Image (cartoon, rainbow, N blue to C red):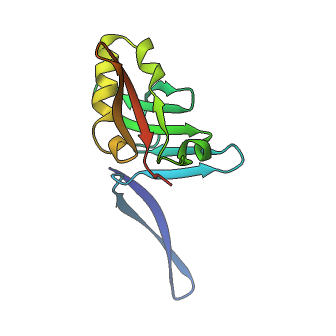
Amino acid sequence: MFFVFFFVFVWYNKLQIEARTYAIKIDMTQPIFNYDEASDTLYISYAPGEQATGIELTPHILLRLNKQERRAIGMTFLEYSLLAQKTDMGPRSFPLTGLSELSDDLRDIVIDVLQRPPVSDVLLLSSYTPSISETIPIMLLQTAY
């Protein structure tokens, strides 16, 4: 949550100007969606301007997070229209290929963030098990924009 300050100039008798400062409390609990049509990129920001670590979940999906607080800062979806396009059998699923390149500690943080709102409101985490000894983490994009 942060404050925005602005000035209002009030006219008195058309001769005097008085400047007053007002503060408005802005609740940043709602995500900010920004779609760039030219690059087909969707940006979702949960904490605009906050420093973050970028994690490439897939070649098309970047998660930005605050590692210390285990909190999502934002997400970027490259080629969003492809990611959001449904197949004949339903929503597309994508393997989380980027998880295999992370340390165990960072992978645990990322999975924790993926499983909780606000990220879980947009991405649904699951797994594919091609054999009893192999589990591949996958996700699907819920309609975000």
Q: Position of residue 4 (x, y in %)?
A: 42, 56
Identify the residue shown where x is 49% and y is 41%: 92
Q: Quadrant of residue 134?
A: top left
Residue 59 located left or right of residue 107: right
Q: Residue furthest bottom?
A: 13
Q: Is residue 60 above or below residue 20?
A: above
> Is 69 in front, or is 19?
69
Q: Position of residue 10 (x, y in %)?
A: 49, 78
**Would you say residue 67 is visible in this rendering?**
no
**Would you say residue 93 is visible in this rendering?**
yes
Identify the residue shown where x is 51% and y is 27%: 58
> Is 38 in front, or is 69?
38
Q: Residue furthest right?
A: 38
Q: Position of residue 17 (x, y in %)?
A: 52, 75
> Is 52 in front, or is 91?
91
Residue 99 located left or right of residue 43: left
Q: Position of residue 26 (x, y in %)?
A: 36, 57
Q: Is residue 30 above or below residue 69?
A: below
Q: Quadrant of residue 48?
A: top left
> Is 14 in front, or is 119?
119
Residue 31 located left or right of residue 113: right
Total marks placed: 0
